[in-house]
Image: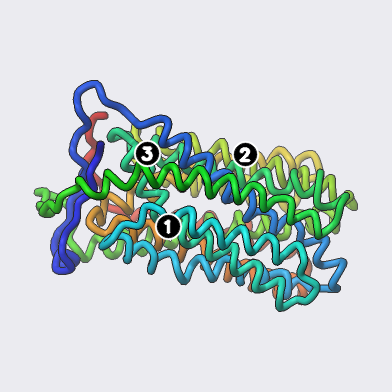
C-alpha cells in the first residue's frame, strides 16, 4: 500500500519532490479496487445530495419570491462553508489523520437535508446549505487521500475514479429533482437523507480499512530531485493551477446554477425539461472527469490541462448563440472537454507539494470551488441588472484563462 510522506513544517521552504512520493507497490500489486469503488460511490452519494441544492432553485425561487442575487447567495453559503473549512481540515489531517471523520462529516449533510426540506424562511435555507457545505469540507480532503492510498501508483486513474463518483452524483441531482422534488415539493428533500445514512455506513467501513494505514506509515524525508522546480516556481505554478480550476469551476457553477433559468427564459421550456437538459450537461462532465486522469497518466498532465481548458473555448463561445438542440449538443461537448482537467490539475498540484497532500487537496477542492461559488453569486447579481443571456455571453470567455498554463513547469514523467 502506498504510504504518504510526513515531514516537518520547515520543509515548506525547501525544494520539493516532483515525482511520485509513495513507495512502489509490491510486485504484481495494483489499485485497491474495492476501496476505490467504495470511496467513489461515497463521493457519488455525497455530491448527489449536494447537487439537490442547485436543482431545487426554481422551486425555492417561486415559493419564496427570491431574486437571482438571493439564489446566488444560497450557492455562496454552500460553497463558502466548504471553501473556508476544507484547507483547515486538510492541514489538520496532514498532521493527524482522522479515519472516521468522513462518516461524522456526512452527518452534517444529513442534518442539512432535513433542515432544507422543512425550511420556510430564507435564513434557514442559507443555514441548511451551509451545513451541507460543512459535510463537503470534511469529506473531500481525507477521501482524496484515501483514493491516492488505494491507487497502487496509478494516481491519475485513482483521482479520476474518485472524481467520476462526484461528477456523476452532481449530474443525478437535477434528474432526481425533476422526478421527485418537483412533483412532490420541498418536503420530499427529506427522503434523500436516507442516502446520507447509507453514505455514513460505507464511510465508517472505509475508515476501518484506513485506520491501519495510518498506524503503520512512517515519516520520511523529502529529497530534492535534480532539475525540479524551485520553491518560487512551485508557488507560481500553484497560483496558476488555482486560477485554471477557478475558471473551470466558475463556468460549471454558472451552468449548474443558472442553466435552468437560461433555458426557461430563452426557449420557454418547462422546469422539468430544463432539469433534464442540465442532467445531460452534468453527465457529460462526469464522463470527462473520468477520462482526464488516465489521459494525464499516459500523455502528461500539462498537455491535458492545456487541451481541456483552451479546447472548450470555441464551444463555450458558440453556446449563447445556439438553438435548443444546438445548446444541448454544445453543452455535452463543453462538459466532456472542460471537466477532463480536474484530475490532472489536482494530481499536478499534489506532485508539486507532496508533503502537504491534505492541505493541497483542501485548497483545490475547497478554495477554488468556493471562489466559483463567490463568482456564481456575482453572476446572479449581474443577471438581475442585465439578463441571464448576457451572463452566458460573459462566461463564454472564461476558458481563455487557460492561457496561463504556459507558466506551468514541466514535471518528469515516470512509467506506470
In three-dimensional space, the C-alpha distance between marks 1 and 2, rounded to whole angstroms, equals 31 Å
Lateral position of residue 348 relative to residue 38, left or right: left
Q: Nearer the viewer, mark 3 or mark 1?
A: 1
The answer to whether any part of residue 301 appears in the image is: yes
**Residue 158, horizontal then vertical, whole percent:** 39, 37
| Disc with the residue nearer the chain's start (3 vs 1) | 1
As helix, strand or loop, the secondary structure at mark 1 comes to: helix
In three-dimensional space, the C-alpha distance between marks 3 and 1, rounded to whole angstroms, equals 25 Å
Q: Which residue is mark 1?
A: 101
Quadrant location, the C terminus:
top left
**Residue 149, horizontal then vertical, whole percent:** 31, 42
- For this rendering, which residue is in front, 296 or 271? 271
- For this rendering, which residue is in front, 284 or 394? 284
Q: Which residue is mark 2?
A: 284
**Residue 197, horizontal then vertical, whole percent:** 60, 49
Residue 156: mark: 3
Lateral position of residue 362 relative to residue 324, left or right: left
- Within 10 Å of disc 2 (Cα), the crowding (few <14, some 14-19, many 20+) is many
In three-dimensional space, the C-alpha distance between marks 3 and 2, rounded to whole angstroms, equals 19 Å
- Within 10 Å of disc 1 (Cα), the crowding (few <14, some 14-19, many 20+) is many
Residue 143: mark: none
Amino acid at each position: 500500500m502506498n504510504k504518504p510522506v510526513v515531514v516537518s513544517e520547515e520543509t515548506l521552504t525547501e525544494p520539493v519532490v516532483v515525482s511520485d512520493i509513495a513507495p512502489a507497490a509490491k510486485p504484481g500489486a495494483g489499485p485497491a479496487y474495492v476501496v476505490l469503488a467504495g470511496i467513489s460511490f461515497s463521493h457519488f452519494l455525497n455530491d448527489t445530495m449536494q447537487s439537490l441544492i442547485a436543482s431545487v432553485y426554481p422551486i425555492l425561487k417561486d415559493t419564496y419570491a427570491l431574486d437571482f442575487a438571493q439564489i446566488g447567495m444560497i450557492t455562496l453559503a454552500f460553497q463558502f462553508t466548504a471553501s473556508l473549512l476544507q484547507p483547515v481540515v486538510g492541514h489538520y489531517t496532514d498532521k493527524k489523520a482522522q479515519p472516521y471523520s468522513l462518516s461524522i462529516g456526512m452527518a452534517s449533510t444529513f442534518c442539512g437535508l432535513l433542515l432544507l426540506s422543512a425550511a420556510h424562511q430564507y435564513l434557514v435555507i442559507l443555514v441548511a446549505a451551509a451545513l451541507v457545505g460543512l459535510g463537503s469540507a470534511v469529506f473531500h480532503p481525507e477521501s482524496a487521500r484515501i483514493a491516492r492510498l488505494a491507487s497502487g501508483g496509478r494516481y491519475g486513474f485513482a483521482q479520476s475514479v474518485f472524481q467520476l463518483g462526484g461528477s456523476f452524483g452532481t449530474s443525478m441531482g437535477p434528474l432526481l429533482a425533476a422526478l421527485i422534488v418537483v412533483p412532490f415539493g420541498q418536503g420530499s428533500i427529506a427522503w434523500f437523507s436516507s442516502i446520507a445514512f447509507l453514505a455514513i455506513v460505507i464511510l465508517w467501513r472505509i475508515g476501518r480499512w484506513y485506520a491501519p494505514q495510518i498506524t503503520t506509515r512512517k515519516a520520511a524525508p523529502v529529497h530534492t530531485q535534480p532539475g525540479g522546480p524551485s520553491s518560487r516556481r512551485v508557488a507560481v505554478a500553484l497560483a496558476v493551477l488555482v486560477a485554471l480550476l477557478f475558471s473551470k469551476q466558475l463556468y460549471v457553477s454558472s451552468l449548474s446554477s443558472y442553466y435552468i433559468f437560461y433555458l426557461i427564459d430563452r426557449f420557454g421550456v418547462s422546469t422539468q425539461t430544463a432539469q433534464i437538459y442540465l442532467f445531460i450537461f452534468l453527465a457529460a462532465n462526469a464522463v470527462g472527469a473520468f477520462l482526464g486522469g488516465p489521459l494525464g497518466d499516459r500523455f502528461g498532465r500539462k498537455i491535458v490541462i492545456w487541451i481541456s481548458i483552451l479546447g472548450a473555448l470555441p464551444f463555450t463561445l458558440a453556446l449563447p448563440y445556439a438553438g435548443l438542440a444546438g445548446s444541448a449538443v454544445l453543452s455535452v461537448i463543453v462538459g466532456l472537454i472542460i471537466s477532463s482537467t480536474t484530475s490532472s490539475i489536482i494530481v499536478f498540484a499534489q506532485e508539486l507539494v507532496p508533503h502537504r497532500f491534505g492541505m493541497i487537496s483542501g485548497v483545490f477542492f475547497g478554495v477554488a470551488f468556493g471562489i466559483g461559488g463567490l463568482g456564481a453569486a456575482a453572476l446572479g447579481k449581474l443577471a438581475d441588472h442585465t439578463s441571464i443571456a448576457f451572463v452566458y455571453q460573459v462566461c463564454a470567455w472564461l476558458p481563455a484563462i487557460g492561457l496561463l498554463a504556459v507558466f506551468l513547469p514541466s514535471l518528469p514523467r515516470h512509467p506506470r
